[in-house]
Amino acid sequence: MKLNIALLAGDGIGPEVIDQAVKVSDAIAQKFGHEITWKPALTGAAAIDAVGEPYPDSTHEVCKNADAVLFGAIGHPKYDNDPSAPVRPEQGLLKMRKALGLFANVRPTFTFPSLLDKSPLKRERIEGTDLVFLRELTGGIYFGEKGRKDNGDTAYDNCVYTRAEVQRLAKKGFELAMTRSKKLCCVDKANVLETSRLWRETVQAMEKDYPEVEVSYEFVDAVAMRLVQWPNSYDVLITENLFGDILTDEASVISGSMGLMPSASMGAEVSLFEPIHGSYPQATGLNIANPMATVLSAAMMFENFGLMEEGKAMRDAVNKALEAGVVTEDLANGGKAYGTKEVGDWLAANI
């Protein structure tokens, strides 16, 4: 198969972990007889520094014409520490999601047998955890009208959803549940928010189309509590943008490190694959960042093309590295810590 992949390294440790994912992906391509053309493009703070905007038109052209996008991370302290900055890296991420129609963020959370005791939660609480969040990405409070009034003393952010936006996200949730344990949880705050009541009534109306799926409805605060008590009681969860942003980061630490969790943002035409850990600017250039989440995101990318054996080979390599202790400092726990590049080399060599 010939694959044309847009490569958006971004900021901070993004370029370092992306380099390793490319290295491992190229090893997969060689092993299985594929041809990958990588097309780099600027985004985030790097793009602001170069051309004055975080998601330039040239980058969008590369992305929309690609078969998929492999993305690193965006964010830089000089923008994080300046609330008045008129242009911010995160604006590029929101613009990209909207422009590419990336409406569904797929965030799996699973455990690794060799790392169960590295989780902040007790082994007996997390063993067997294998859940997936589907977070709506292009609506809600992040995209609603926002501003200041009363001489800047009052601020507002409007949360708006349409029924169609809920339906298309919920449809993906139902379809995913049918391939797994046929359990779906709709996460909302329907006792308080009108948008949540729309979510709940829309999903309830869709239940008849998926009679085999057991659907539950839980308030977001209850889910936040249960994720640290009984995470393995969940399978597929669907939720709106803000709730999903918070809950998926909470769930990500169950595995023992944010540096292990991949994600995908799905659209009608093109999909984007990225690690969840952010740009981690303090580690930039130090060769200490964990590349495994980015490698596993690339595995999700291969599987999205129907190349399941290729994805499994990447996952198997990561599991072998974890079992062998070929890990970066976030997982070394006092033992030998390997560099970002060394972990990438090991994974590629084992593939």
Image (cartoon, helix red, strand yellow):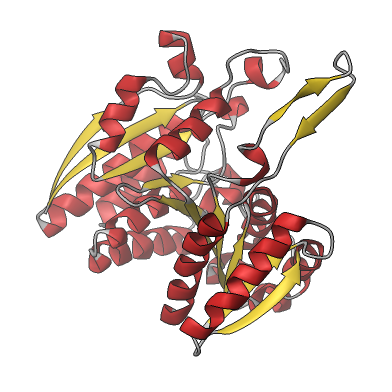
Q: From what the image shows, is residue 160 above or below residue 33? A: above
Total count of labels: 0
Q: Give the quadrant of the C terminus.
A: bottom left
- Residue 67 placement (x, y as % from top left): 23, 45
Of residue 23 and residue 266, the one placed in the foreground of this image is 266
- Residue 211 placement (x, y as % from top left): 50, 89
Give left or right: position of 248 versus 304: right
Of residue 195 and residue 25, the one placed in the foreground of this image is 195
Q: Give the quadrant of the N terminus.
A: bottom left
Residue 287 visible, this angle = no
Give left or right: position of 222 versus 30: right
* x 58%, y 53%: residue: 162
Residue 148 visible, this angle = yes
Give left or right: position of 195 versus 286: right
- Residue 133 placement (x, y as % from top left): 57, 62
* x 87%, y 13%: residue: 151
- Residue 306 placement (x, y as % from top left): 24, 65
Residue positioned most to the bottom: 212
* x 44%, y 34%: residue: 96
